[in-house]
Image: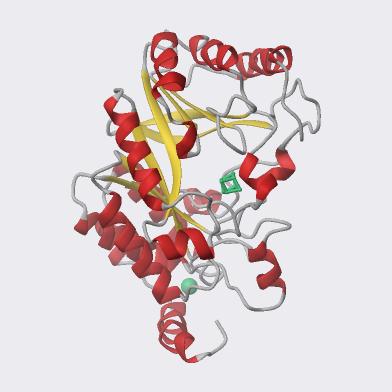
Amino acid sequence: MTESIARGLARERKPRGAEEGSPSVPVNLWSEPEALHGQRVPAFVAILRTRGCYWADLKGCSMCGYAKDTLGRSATAEEISRQRDRIRQAYRGQPYVKFYTSGSFLDDREVDAASRAELLGSFSGTARRILFETLPEFATPERLAPLREAFDGEIEVALGLESTQPEVLGRLINKGAPPSEYLQAADRIRALGFRTKGYLLLKPPYLTEEESVADVLTSIERARDHFDTLSVNPVHIQNGTVVEWLFRRGRYRPPWLWSLTEVLAEGSRRAPGLRLVSFPTAGGLPRGPHNCRVCDRTVLAAIETASLDQQFDGLSGLTCRCRATYDAQRALEPLGAEA
Ligand code: SF4
Ligand SMILES: [Zn+2]
């Protein structure tokens, strides 16, 4: 990894939104590195502006601030159609396409059934894989089957499992459904011929660094048989969240990148054959996962390379002077030392 490549990686993968507010304009569009069946490819990412996550309105998750990117009401089919036109104009033939909605693509209140099929159908013959995210309760055969008809490539359904430990998912992260519902939804999705991707959260609030590493490793082992890909998402501080409240009072530090390299290296050993990835948001920034200023870029570059190529050996050989600080903080944190 050259220094120039590494320098480009210690930054936000998601650029700032260009235009804001209009229901006819997606929240954001960009291209990012990905891999498809072992080959590096560019992925096209579109964030649709929709009503947003219903759970965020009811209670919300402790680390999630995505509600700011939403309309606050359901988008009409006409508005979704105009967003689709913008998306198609910006699309450059990338083989991997990802649709995010700051909620659930399969929730009819966010994207109605006809608009979902039209959106996916408009990429038939061009994209090889389309990914979207949903909460487990919306992953039903009635919602999924028409999408199989609409799009002739692979469909990957992503679920924000976060943790397979009920206590962590329910009490610390504040998700509405227990882990078992996510695992059952993944099985349903697979039975219909779709691919499954699960997100695991590294360092929810109220867990120490040590506990969060153990939580992700346990979750990898328990979830591995239900998902084709598991993506480890280290917490970054989003506005207006419980995590931000704790962060502002010095009671929360985003995870160290050393924790991330450990869960990727050890997780890949414990779950051979599983595709394990991590593409941190806000990596190297104070509100994102970080080490010291000296090594962030190099470590982030190694994490991206390992994720794209599924080669994790290089992560174990990384070194920096901050490693000793990390080890000491990790050992002392359970005793109440400053994290
Ligand atoms: S993390 Fe997912 S389920 Fe939780 S509030 Fe955010 S969008 Fe909704
Ligand atoms: Zn360092």
Above or below residue 316? Residue 63 is above
Please give the name of the residue rendered at 57% of the width and 11% of the height, measured from the top-left corner. 114
Q: Is residue 140 left or right of residue 44?
A: left
Q: How many numbered tags mark residues here?
A: 0
The residue drawn where x is 71% and y is 39% is 69
Out of 132 and 183, give the one closest to the viewer.
Answer: 183
The image quarter in which residue 89 lies? top right
Q: For residue 30, what is the image quadrant?
A: top right
Q: Residue 150 vs residue 246: left or right?
A: left
**Residue drawn at (63%, 19%), measured in percent from left and top?**
87
Q: Is residue 95 visible?
A: no
Q: Quadrant of the C terminus?
A: bottom right
Q: In the image as oriented, which residue stretches furthest toward the right?
A: 21
From what the image shows, is residue 231 above or below residue 157?
A: below
List x then y, in percent, for residue 229: 33, 41
Q: Position of residue 236 (x, y in %)?
A: 59, 58
User: Can residue 53 be seen?
Assistant: yes
Q: Is residue 321 above or below residue 247?
A: below
Question: Residue 186 or 64: which is nearer the viewer?
Answer: 186
**What colour scheme was applied to this rendering of the protein?**
secondary structure
Q: Residue at x 40, y 73 (%)?
A: 211
- Note whether 300 is above or below 50 in the view shown: below
Expressed as whole percent of the image width and height from the top left, the position of residue 47 reads 62, 31
On screen, residue 19 versus residue 35, left or right, reads right
Give the x, y percent position of residue 137.
47, 36
